[in-house]
Amino acid sequence: MPDESAGEPGQSASAASTVGTQLSTPETADIPTPEAVSDATNPTGTVIWHRKHLRVEDQEAVSRAIADSDAICPLFVFDPSFYADSGLACDARIQFLEEAVASLDRLYAATPAPATHVSATSGGHELEATTESAMPASDPGGTPPDTLQCADPPGLTIGYGDPVDLLARFVDQGWNVVTMATPTSRYGQRRDERAREACGDAMTFVSGDGLVRDAEWPRSDWQPQITDWLAASQHAPGWDDHDTVRVAIQTSVTPALVDRRFDIMPTKTKVPVGTHRAATTTLREFADRIRSYPGNISAPQDARDGTSGLSPYLNFGLLSVRQAHQYVDENAPSCRGAEMFESRLVWNLHYNQKLVDWPGWTEKAVNPVFEGQNEDRHDDSLITAWKQGRTGFPMVDASMRCLRKTGWLNFRMRAMCASFFTHILHQPWWIGADWYHHHLIDSDVGINYTQWQSQAGLIGKPSQRVYNPRKQVRDQDPDGEWIAEWIPELAALPSEFLDRPEKAPLAVQDECGVQIGETYPRPVVDFEARREQFWSRYERQRPVAARELRRQKIAKRASFSGGYNAARAIAAKHGDSEDDATKGTQVALDELSGGEAANADPPPSESSTTDTRDPRDTSADLDRSPGQTPIPSGTGETAGEPSPDDRTAVEGQQQPDSGDDDTSAEADAEPTGQTRFGDFE
C-alpha cells in the first residue's frame, strides 16, 4: 500500500491478526522465472512495483521496464499494516485507493502487450476463505462497488502482506524490481530501505517526478529544472516498439476482497470516485470552466465546485502533475485561471520537494527553537471542541464539520483552522496535522505536514499568519450560506450575528430559537487575549529562530526555494547574535506588523504592473478600533493563499513582472492575490 499514512502503521486490525503474518501472496513457487514466460535468449524480467504512482502513462518506471526487459510484471501489494485501527487514513480514503488499484488493473489488462497469466496456488484463496469464515453468516459483507471490480483475466498482480518479502521472492526467481522514488516519511522510508537491503542490486528507484534528489543543495536552480520538466515530453510506455510480455499472477487477492476483509465502510459524502476515467473527466471539465477559477477558490461554498477537484488524483498518482499542467496549457483558454492553476501545480512540487529534502516534517519542528511548541498547553477539551466543530467560532466549526463529513476543505479554510488550532487554542501542531491527514481524501504527506508547520510558524520565517475566523465569516460567507449548511442550529440566526453569535441580543436569540451556550456553544477561548499571548511569545522566539537558519543543517530542513542564501539572508536581517540571545533581545512590534523589510512574503502586487490583491483581504485579519495599536498578523493581501517561504529574502533580488494584460471575459473575475508561477525565485 502507498506511503499515504504519515503515522506509524501500528498493529494489524483485529480482523486480520490471524492471517496478517502468514500471507504474502504469491508464494515463491507461484512466481515464474523470466525464462518461463519469454522466448528471448537470456531474457530479463522486471517487476514494476506500484506504490503511489498508480498510472501507466507518464510513469518512468513503466516506460523504462518495457524498454529494458523482455517480460514485465506490474505489481501492487496491499500492506495490512495500513488497515490498523490506529492508521491515519479514513475508510473513504482507503476505498479511493482500492478503486485506484482496481482501475490500474483494468488499464493494464487493456494494454496491447502479449500477456501471460499464472495462477497462484495459495495465498489469495486463503485470504478469501478467512474472509468468509470471519463474517457472520447473516452478513456476507455486502456488495462492493463496481469500481472495485478487477479485470478478468487480470492485468496487475495484486499481493497481500509485507511488500518487501514478496519483492525478495521475485528477485530470488531472477527478476529485477523498478519503482518510482516517492516522497516518504516514517514507515515508507524504512520500508524502502528494507527493500533496498533485501533486493540489493536488483532494486532500482527511479526519480522521474520532477523532484531533485541526491544533491547537496537540491534548491540550487530548482525553478528552471521544474520549468523544463513540466514542458518535457511525458514518459510513454513503448508497447508498440517492444515485444515485452506482460505477466499477471492470479492471486485471487482483489481490492473488493480486501475491502470486505477489513470492513471498509465509508460514511463520508461527496467523495470522488478513484478511477482513471474519473480523473481525466475531472481534468477535462475543469479546463472547460477554468476562467471562473480565480473567483471561486476562497469562499468554501464556491470552492467545492469551483476548484479543480484534482487533488486526490494527483495525490494517488492517477494523474501526474505534468499531465495536468500540459493538458491545461494545451486545451484551456489562455486566462488568469489557467495561470493560477499552473502555479498551484508548481506548489505541489515545491512542498513535496521539502519532504524529499527532509523526511522529518511529519515528526519534528523544522526549527529547533520551536520543538515542543504548545505541548505544555495541551488541553484535550479544546482539541475535542476543535475536532467536533464546537468551538463557538462558526467559520471554524463549519469547516471542521465539513472536513469530518466530506473529507475536503478548500485551502483558505484549512489554513484558517490550522492557524486557529495553533495560535489561538495553543495546541501542539502535530495533533491537528494528524487529524487532517486522517480525514482528508486528498491528503498528501508532503503538502499537509509542511503546510501545518508553515501555518504554525515553526520554520523561522520573519512573517506569520494569524487568521481571524470572525473576519472570514464577513469576507467569505456574509450571507451565512456555508454556516447554515454545516451548523443548522445557527441557520435561523440573522446573518449579521454569525461572525459573533454570542453577541446576538437575547431578544433576537429568543425570537430565532437559538440559545448561545445551549443550542450552540459560547467561544471556548477569548480570541483577542489568546492572539496577544501568541504574539508576545512569538516576538521573543522569532530572532532566535531566525538565527538558527544560519546553520546549514537547519537551512536544509527548511528547504527554501532560494536555498542556503535565502536562509542566511533571513538570519542576517532578522536573527539575533549569540550575545543578544542570552540577553533576551526582542524585535519591535512595529517591525513585525508592516513593511517589506519585515515581511518575507510580500504580495505579488509589490513588484507587478497590475494590482492582484484580493479586495476581501486588503487588511490584516484583525478586529481593532481606530487608533488601536495593530497586532502583527502576517496576512494582508496574500492571506489564505500559498506563498513562497523566501521569495524576496535575498537582498536585492529582482522580481519578475507578474502583470496581466489579458482583457478577455475573465478579467472581471475577482483577483485573489494568488502567487504566480514566476514568483518562486
Image (cartoon, rainbow, N blue to C red):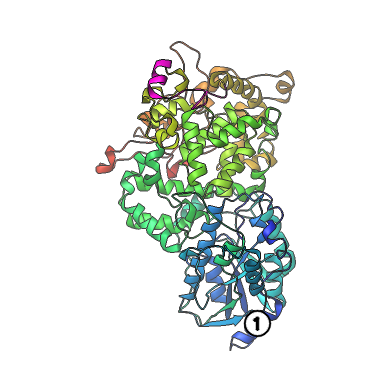
The location of residue 34, given as percent across then percent down, is 63, 82
85 versus 620 height, above or below: below
Q: Quadrant of the N terminus?
A: bottom right
Q: Is residue 559 visible?
A: no
Q: Residue furthest front?
A: 138
Q: Residue furthest top?
A: 627
Question: Along the horizontal axis of the image, is 371 left or right of 47?
Answer: right
The location of residue 86, given as percent across then percent down, is 67, 49
Front-most of residues 469 and 257? 257
Q: Which residue is mark 1?
A: 32
The location of residue 239, given as percent across then percent down, is 47, 77
Q: Quadrant of residue 246?
A: bottom right
Q: Is residue 136 visible?
A: yes
Given the image, on which type of amino acid does mark 1 rest?
A: Pro
First to last magenta residue range? 506-525
At 62% from the left and 70% from the top, the residue drawn is 128
Tell me if residue 163 is in the magenta stretch.
no
Q: Main secondary structure of the magenta part?
A: loop
At 47% from the left and 20% from the top, the residue drawn is 502
Question: Along the horizontal axis of the image, is 362 left or right of 270?
Answer: right
Q: Quadrant of residue 504?
A: top left
